[in-house]
Amino acid sequence: TTNNAWKTIPWTKVQRKIFKLQKSIFQAAKSGQDAKARRWQRLLVKSYYARLLAVRL
């Protein structure tokens, strides 16, 4: 069932991956690398993990 699949998702890994992406965005923006920051942002928005986390919260 869907509920069982939901419980098997490695939430710690999902959060870690999203945090890593957010950190990359922050560091790129802080160092003035706007194009790189936008690229990371686009990747975050399209990320499967980000969608999972958004639905969970």
Image (tube, grey):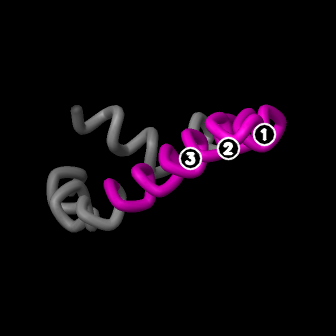
Q: Are marks 1 and 2 in contact (CB under 8 Å)?
A: yes
Instruction: Find residue 57 and report its horizontal and vertical position in percent.
Output: 22, 32
Q: Amino acid at mark 2?
A: Ala
Look at mark 2 in the image and give the residue it sits on: 28
- Please tell me whether mark 3 sits on a helix, a strand or a loop: loop
Horizontal side of residue 43 vs 49, given as left or right:
right
- Please tell me whether mark 2 sits on a helix, a strand or a loop: helix
Instruction: Find residue 32 and report its horizontal and vertical position in percent.
Output: 75, 35
What distance separates the C-alpha of mark 1 from that of mark 3?
21 Å
What distance separates the C-alpha of mark 3 from that of mark 2?
18 Å
Look at mark 3 in the image and give the residue it sits on: 47
Given residues 43 and 25, the one toward you in this image is 25
Q: Is residue 36 magenta?
A: yes
Q: Main secondary structure of the magenta part?
A: helix
Horizontal side of residue 44 vs 43, given as left or right:
left
Crowdedness of circle 2 by 10 Å Cα count: few (<14), some, many (20+)?
some
Q: Earlier in the sequence, mark 1 or mark 2?
A: 2
Give residue 50's quadrant in the image.
top left
Given residues 40 and 27, the one toward you in this image is 27
Q: Quadrant of the N terminus?
A: bottom left
From the viewer's perspective, is the residue at label 3 or at label 2 nearer?
Answer: 2
Q: Earlier in the sequence, mark 3 or mark 2?
A: 2
Crowdedness of circle 3 by 10 Å Cα count: few (<14), some, many (20+)?
some
Q: Amino acid at mark 1?
A: Gln
Highlighted range, magenta: 15-42
Q: Amino acid at mark 3?
A: Ser
- Please tell me whether mark 1 sits on a helix, a strand or a loop: loop
Instruction: Find residue 39 and report its horizontal and vertical position in percent.
Output: 76, 41
